[in-house]
Image (cartoon, rainbow, N blue to C red):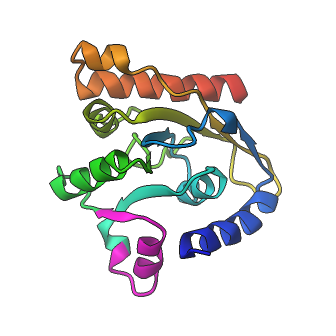
Amino acid sequence: MTFYSFARSVVAGIFKPMYRIEVIGLEHFPKEGGVLLCTNHIHNFDPLVVGATAPRPVHFMAKEEIFKVPVLGNIVRKCNAFPVKRGMGDREALRAGLKVLKDGNVFGLFPEGTRSKTGEIGKGLSGAGFFALRTEAYVLPCAIIGPYKSFGKLKVVYGKPIAMEEVRSKKASADEATELIMSEIHKLIIEHR
């Protein structure tokens, strides 16, 4: 058993009963190939919840400060995360994200870049569109719905892969591609709220 599998089972064992997590749409998750998994961001636990419910290991970007914390930095790295410098175009992080997708793995991204304070979906940053346009990866929308309340009800909804062919062929901007992705996440929230 890999460290990731072990950590995933520990997190799932704690979080699934605590937040009564209901997972919807796993049949939409591609079984192989690169997947850009784009999710709304409502809580610090979102990466843990997505990692525990996704059927394949997920690689996340995490702010570089986390990697400097003793013990925690090592755990985060072993859970497939890689550092990103926030607030600037971090070319190394962009290259690392592209490599994850080109190697046929799952790259989890929160297009809003930061947590929503209100729980409402915010505007996505161009990074999601950048990755969607630069690779042939599936682009999979995901919505986390509900408050993180003990023994409340939290839903994780995986939508159908977004058809990006037309967007790629008409040479859309990264911002336009991100807008499409965010609108699909928003539709999932409205449909399953």
When the figure is inspected, residue 136 is found, relative to residue 99, above or below; the finding is above
* Residue 193 vs residue 72, the one in the foreground: 72
Dividing the picture into quarters, in which one does residue 5 lie? bottom right
Quadrant into which the C terminus falls? top right
Q: Residue at x 31, y 32 (%)?
A: 129
User: Residue extending furthest bottom?
Assistant: 70
When the figure is inspected, residue 100 is found, relative to residue 1, above or below; the finding is above
17 sits to left or right of 186 = right
- Inspect this view and state whether residue 188 appears: yes
Quadrant into which the N terminus falls? bottom right
* Residue 156 vs residue 33, the one in the foreground: 33
Question: Residue 86: image x %, image y %?
Answer: 26, 56
Residue segment shown in magenta? 67-83
The question of residue 159 being in magenta is answered with no
Question: Residue 167: image x %, image y %?
Answer: 32, 17
Q: Residue at x 74, y 68 (%)?
A: 14
- Inspect this view and state whether residue 121 appears: no
**Numbered circles on residues, count:** 0
The question of residue 77 being in magenta is answered with yes
Dividing the picture into quarters, in which one does residue 65 lie? bottom left
167 sits to left or right of 122 = left
When the figure is inspected, residue 57 is found, relative to residue 171, above or below; the finding is below
Question: Residue 128: image x %, image y %?
Answer: 34, 37
Question: Residue 9: image x %, image y %?
Answer: 69, 68
